[in-house]
Amino acid sequence: MVYQLTRESIPVLARETFEPENEDKEIWQPKWNCFCCHDSGIVNGNLVRLVIPDYKALSDKRPLCQNCEVSDRFHSDDLPEYIAASHDYRFTREICKYLDEFGRKDWSETLKLWHEKKKQGLNPHAEALSKMRKVINKKSMNPDDVEF
Ligand SMILES: [Zn+2]
């Protein structure tokens, strides 16, 4: 006999969480130490555009972060030429330090806004969704044309 579940017979399970819930906990805790490159060694694309406004992520050299040590491996003399040629070495320590501070400030302002919206009973994700819809509605889906 084949047993088929129905709306009435489908089991109701209790939730299973993988981390303790805390409503006041800040969401999106950054896991990186360096806000300039998010610990990747490559300057975050949004921050690059503060320095190179028309930066195109798919065709331009990738700027190396000088705010942390992650990109140190790219400064070796043993580096294959093709790797060295695909990276932008012009971002100085001062520039990257500024971008790190800018990224930190931007992050905390976004969090503050998120918590304010939540406190007002609004859906804090709504703004992000509406931003995403605008991107989707753009004629071009080229990631270089997306503004953040
Ligand atoms: Zn960095």
Image: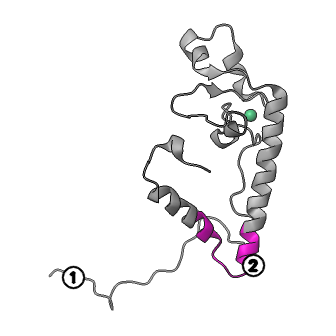
Height in image: 62 above or below 8? above
Q: Is residue 56 magenta?
A: no
Whether residue 97 sits left or right of residue 41 in the image: it is right
Disc 1: residue Cβ within 8 A of ligand 1's nearest atom: no
Mark 1, residue position: 3
N-terminal label among 2 and 1? 1
The Cα atoms of the two marked residues, 2 and 1, are separated by: 47 Å
Image height of 37 relative to 64, above or below: below
Residue 65, horizontal then vertical, whole percent: 73, 29
> What amino acid is found at the position of numbered circle 1 in the picture?
Tyr
Examine the image and state in which quarter residue 38 appears: top right
Give the residue displayed 71% in from the left and 74% down from the top: 117
Left or right of 131 on screen, residue 100: right
* x and y, in percent, of residue 61 in the image: 59, 25
Q: Classify mark 1: helix, strand or loop.
A: loop
Q: Secondary structure at mark 2?
A: helix
The magenta region covers 114-128
Residue 57 on image: x %, y %: 56, 34
Name, please, the residue furthest toward the left: 1
Residue occupied by mark 2: 119
Please rate how many residues cluster around mark 2, counting C-alpha atoms within 10 Å: few if below 14, some from 14 to 19, many from 20: few
